[in-house]
Image (cartoon, grey):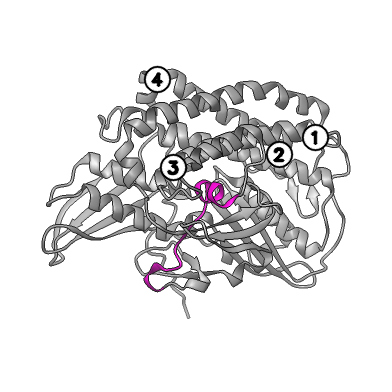
Amino acid sequence: MTNTIVIDPVTRIEGHAKITLHLDDDGHVADARFHVTEFRGFEKFCEGRMFWEMPSITARICGICPVSHLMASAKAGDTILGVRIPTAAEKLRRLMNWGQIVQSHALSFFHLSGPDLVLGMESEPAQRNVAGLIALNPDFARDGIRLRQFGQDVIRLLGGKSIHPAWTVPGGVREPLTIEKRDEMLRRLPEAFEIVERALKLYKNEVVAKHRREYDVYGNFPSLFIGLVSQQGGLEHYDGLLRVMDSDGMILEPGLAPKRFREIIAEAVEPWTYLKVPYYKPYGYEGQAGMYRVGPLARVNLCDFAGTPKAEAELRLLRSGGRVVRQGFAYHYARLIEILFALEKIEETLNAPDITNKHIRSQADVNHLHGVGVSEAPRGTLFHEYWVDENGLLQSVNLIIATGQNNLAMNRTVLQIARAYVTGQKLTEGLLNRIEHGIRLFDPCLSCSTHAAGQMPLAVELYGPDGELLNTLRR
């Protein structure tokens, strides 16, 4: 007896995607879809492992934001142990998470979206990349490198290395922070503040003016927003309560305990993508009524306040036209605000008197057979849910990733851009890049971790009303 296992399409293609556009009889865009062709098996192959191993295992899901999985996984482990981690350990975890926010957002703004924002959406393709950015505006490109380096160094100084540090564990962290490492981070902070303030000035004074139509069109539609807020309603990245808000600013869920997330989030599947389609359960999936957005824009919409002086000033400026910002293009501004907030919180936390305390881990064994860990990744809210036996052996794993939660919104954005710019039966490279930028607004994991110095492999297919393939453009 033999078994045959077929995986179709072939995996290991992180960053590969396809977009299809469908025209009506009048040549207008009737529908558009963003197809993700990756197959991920993390949930299944984690079964049978010890929950103690999960932070290190699940961190390998992403090379750009492994810290997100370290945090969510360790927090799920905390609940299985039934412990409250030491105060110093929580502060150290927060420091690492803020370091990740800085480095990941810097990569997105400066190097993934920067060529479009600075050089132009339809600039020469051969120059619309990091190399072209360096040639035209070397200071801007260098700022991105230095700011990202600071975030990575925060992670390295805490965990021993910048990528996949085996440091966050159920019950706390492995090693305390030394005075020398604390002082090194503090020494580097002034430069980081200067860089993000220059970037904010560029965005507000030049980018928005240059891309006014894009700001008005890209991702500008009503949706729900979901994310964490602090117990007081402030901007939050590590812990807190789940809040749900609609695009008119009405709070549908003021503060739900993260372990109850299944009451508000469900997942659908579609035959045209491997990416799951989460939705807001009370509103349902039919007609995309339950579509919601997560990530930087969602977080700055959801919070009542930032809680740090500089970020608070920028938040108020962002909201000068109203409490809720619908425009997806504002994801760029939201990332810069979050970088500023993270830097302020890093400085505040490093100056806390107990930050070098050596009590950094609570000891316990399995006390609960179910654990949920929720944290804010750079791209949005991340859920880890584990079921274990009495020995801590994983029986089942459920992961809800931020990129998936933006799935409906990404598809809506692609459709919106296509309807605004596609006419007739001709595709141009500039159009392809505009559609791609609509995806970049969400900084999805499928592109950012492997194509920082190149172009995202992308295919756009244009179909007529009879299903005939009219035109294909590949990158």
Which amino acid type is shown beneath numbered disc 1?
Leu
Callout 2–callout 1 Cβ contact below 8 Å: yes
**Going by the image, does 283 lie left or right of 194?**
left
Q: CA distance from mark 2 to mark 1?
A: 11 Å
Q: Which residues are magenta?
A: 286-303
Image height of 338 relative to 385, above or below: above
Can you identify the residue that label 4 sits on?
137
**Can you tell which of label 3 and label 2 is closer to the viewer?**
3
Can you identify the residue that label 3 sits on?
330
Q: Give x and y (percent) for residue 226.
A: 55, 58
Mark closest to the chain's N terminus, 3 or 1: 1
Q: Give x and y (percent) for residue 243.
A: 60, 59
Mark closest to the chain's N terminus, 2 or 4: 2
Quarter of the rendering containing residue 79: bottom right
> Is 381 in front, or is 345?
345
Q: CA distance from mark 3 to mark 2?
A: 26 Å
Q: Give x and y (percent) for residue 267.
A: 50, 69
Residue 405 visible to an observer of this rendering: yes
Can you identify the residue that label 1 sits on?
177
**Going by the image, does 183 lie left or right of 418?**
right
Residue 104 visible to an observer of this rendering: no
Mark closest to the chain's N terminus, 4 or 3: 4
